[in-house]
Structure formats: structure tokens, C-alpha cells
Image (spheres, grey):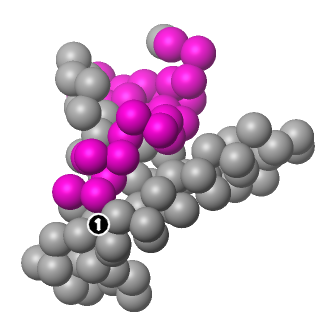
Amino acid sequence: MSESTLIETERLRLRDLRPDDFDDVHAYGSDPEVVQYVPWGPNTEQVTRDFLARNIERAAEEPRDDFSLAIVPKGEDRLVGTA
């Protein structure tokens, strides 16, 4: 398990968000079909940047009380969602 991986299952890794997740996060967050049943989106590039920055900051807080994690299929490095 890597330093930023918090949870690992047989099929998935849950890890902290990183700045280089922008393309993957923006791909789903800006897709009207993907976000039609959630109370946010479709996101602009700036909203996605703000989301990542806010969650990266929160991950560094001590004590940490907010966990927004990247969902990454095992064996891949692309994020498919957040939890």
C-alpha cells in the first residue's frame, strides 16, 4: 500500500486526491449525464480546481476530520470517482 493509499480492497484503492487528478475529476464532474442526480455540477474547470485544492488542504489538516478520497481501480492510476 502506498503512503497516500488509505484503504485497499481486492479491486480498488481509496487514496488521497492529488493535483494530477484534475483531468479525471473534471471528466466526470463536467459531464451533465454523470451529474444529473447530484446537487452539484456540471463543473467548470475552476470549480474542479477549487474542489481539488480544498480537499488536498483538508487532507493535510491535523487532526484530520474530512476524508474525500479518490476511487482508483487496482492496477490502474486513473481515478474513476470520489467518495
Name the residue: 21% across, 85% down: 36
> Quadrant where the C terminus lies?
bottom left
Q: Position of residue 60 (x, y in %)?
A: 75, 38
Q: Residue furthest top?
A: 1
Q: Name the amino acid, label 1.
A: Gly
Residue found 35% across the figure and 64% down from its top: 45
Q: Furthest residue to the right? A: 63
Q: Residues within 10 Å of mark 1 (few under 14, many from 20)?
A: many
Let me know if residue 3 is in the magenta part.
yes
Q: Quadrant of residue 31?
A: bottom left
Residue 12 lies, in percent from the top left, at 31, 31
Q: Is residue 71 visible?
A: no
Q: Which residues are magenta?
A: 2-27
Q: Choose top left, top right, bottom left or bottom right for residue 71.
A: top left
Badge 1 marks a residue whose secondary structure is helix
Left/right placement of residue 34 relative to residue 56 reads left
Q: Nearer the viewer, residue 17 or 15?
A: 17
| Rendered view: 74 above or below 15 | above
Residue closer to the observer: 14 or 40: 40
- In the rendered structure, the answer to whether residue 50 lies left or right of residue 83 reads right
**Which residue position is annotated with label 1?**
29
Q: Residue at x 38, y 29 (%)?
A: 13
Q: Where 15 falls versus 46 (above or below)? A: above
Residue drawn at (24%, 70%), measured in percent from left and top? 30
Asked whether residue 25 is in view, the answer is yes
Coordinates of residue 15 in the picture (x, y in percent): 48, 33
